Image (cartoon, helix red, strand yellow):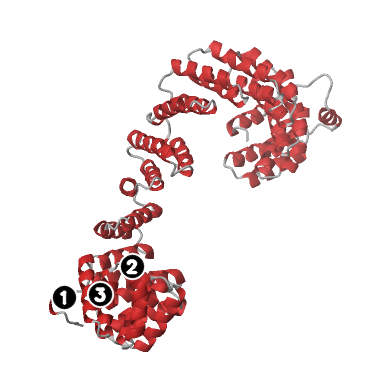
Amino acid sequence: MLKRGLTIVAAVCGMVVAGGKGYAQSERRKEKPAAAEAAAALPAFTAQEQQLSESYFLEGMKFFVLEEYGKALDRFQRAYAISPTNAAVNYKLAETSLLLGSVRGALPFAKAALELEPKNQYYHLLLAQIYTNQQQYEEAIKVYARLTTELPNTEQYLFNLTDLYLAKNRLDDALRTLGQIEEKYGLIEEISFKKQQIYLKQNNLEKALAEGRNLIEANPDEVKYLLAQAEMLAANKRVAEAIQMAEKALKVAPDNAYGRLMLADLLQQQGKHAEADVQLELAFGNSSLDIDSKVKILVDYIRRLPDAKVATQAIKLAELTTKAHPQEAKAFAVAGDIYVNADKKLQARDNYLKAVKLDPGHFKIWQQIVLLDGEMNHTDSLIVHSERALEFFPNQPMFWYYNGVAHLLNKNYSKGAKSLEYGRRMAGNNVELQLQFNLQLGDAYHSLEQYDLSDQAYDRVLAIDPNNPHALNNYSYFLSLRGHNLAKAKIMAGVLVAQFPDNATYLDTYAWVLYKLKDYQEAKRLLEKAVALSSDATIIEHYGDVLYQLGSREAALKQWVRANQVGGASEAISKKIKDKKLYE
């Protein structure tokens, strides 16, 4: 849209308020346009009509300035009804219609205004704008060409004409017009770059490079021209020349990080990986290279991990990034990602912690932190970090889950159960989350000796997933320890072993249920298989207990001794060995 101040001046300057030749008709060409001829054919209006028309026009201008365009259009239309051949009235009708969104309605008035006053540049500009808005680029080109040819001091509109030529892919005309601009204004960066793009479209690389050389010769210390030339050479597979140009740029500006980055890429293309790494490190150590550019490159390294050679360079670049951008959370976040994918969990967790210290509102980073705490069995850290995460995301069930599990691992079963219950309510209808919470609650309530709640939690799991190994194993085992509902425990343990016939833990669970049912022979068979698969102290001790019940006292003693040597057997193991007697 044209600047409003200029258009008002243009319109008002077209008026002669009193007497004379009539406003907006002060200058006529010898060859009258159609609108001018029509004006000559109309009868002259009276002084009273002229005054009324001018009054409507001025009132319309007032509403126009106040941006009450509907009222302005009404007054301009009244003025037009009296003096339809007045250029200023036609112009303002066109401009107001355009502002009201009626491009089609504006066009005839804009054309009439220009025909009536062909030397008014604002009338040219409005008509060109309307044609451009309607994507009638050829018509807009004609208007701008006429404007820049016939009216003085309009060279600045050659830029608009160039853009229209480019829109129509009239490349030679665009080049000719850009040449006219250079004749008027001299060497201009924007013009040279446009000419380069046109030459490249015409597959004329040499002329495009020549434009670049012109810029470099005129400004030998301007590094961006050198780098632009290098980029053009590289894009056209003239890598060796591009390297020379990039090196020349870096002699001018050694601290230019983007030049280092470009040179690194070019050297990589030539297989000079060590040299490329040096340039890349110089770029990453420079804080002027923006963090997003560095992150983009590091993400590409992540895709190639866990390759050991790649990991070494990726870690080095990540450390340079955090050093150069110590206040950028994303620098530490991407460093954390690098370390995770390089299987360096502690360093990953610590970088993530630095990221959330700078910007704590990132759910995924907190998620990574608690996951890593869990994987490293850092239960105290897991409690602290999950509680910190809950300050920002109190409605995220996974943080309640990890907090509850951490408390269970620390044997604080009461706190663990509270967190898990709260998280379970947060999980809503998420079936998978409900399952995970109930599994942990079954274990927690068993440890708290709240057996009904424990059984209910496991039953909720099995209602969702009847073959869930965790629930089948723990539920049946805990029932056996309590000597409660052993028939149900036997069914569950049998289902479990049918699924996993070579799992020593599950064999032991089933055997212990049978032991409680006094089916010692079958328990012995299962435990023989289990001890052959595992050296777990509990399984060995159970095997000794079964042997004792079957009357093999010496064999039982040997298994108890072995269990004690392995470590992790029951508290009664020493007494069993000392007294050579079973204690339950």
Looking at the rendering, which quadrant does residue 546 occupy? bottom left
Q: Which residue is mark 3?
A: 541
User: SS of the residue at dot 2?
Assistant: loop
Q: Which residue is mark 2?
A: 534
User: SS of the residue at dot 3?
Assistant: helix
Q: Earlier in the sequence, mark 3 or mark 2?
A: 2
Structural crowding at the residue carrying mark 2, measured as other residues with C-alpha within 10 Å and reported as few (<14), some (14–19) or many (≥20): few
* Amino acid type assigned to the residue bearing label 2 in the image: Ser
Tag on residue 317?
none
Q: Residue at x 44, y 72 (%)?
A: 500
Q: In this rendering, does residue 473 appear at all? A: yes
Residue 271 % position (x, y): 52, 27
Q: Which residue is mark 1?
A: 577
Q: Residue at x 52, y 13 (%)?
A: 219
* Amino acid type assigned to the residue bearing label 1 in the image: Ile
Q: Residue at x 50, y 20 (%)?
A: 246
Q: Earlier in the sequence, mark 2 or mark 1?
A: 2
Left or right position of 335 against 120 = left
User: SS of the residue at dot 1?
Assistant: helix
Report the Cα–Cα distance between label 3 and label 2: 12 Å
Q: Earlier in the sequence, mark 3 or mark 1?
A: 3
Q: Relative to 322, does residue 366 appear above or below in the rendering? A: below
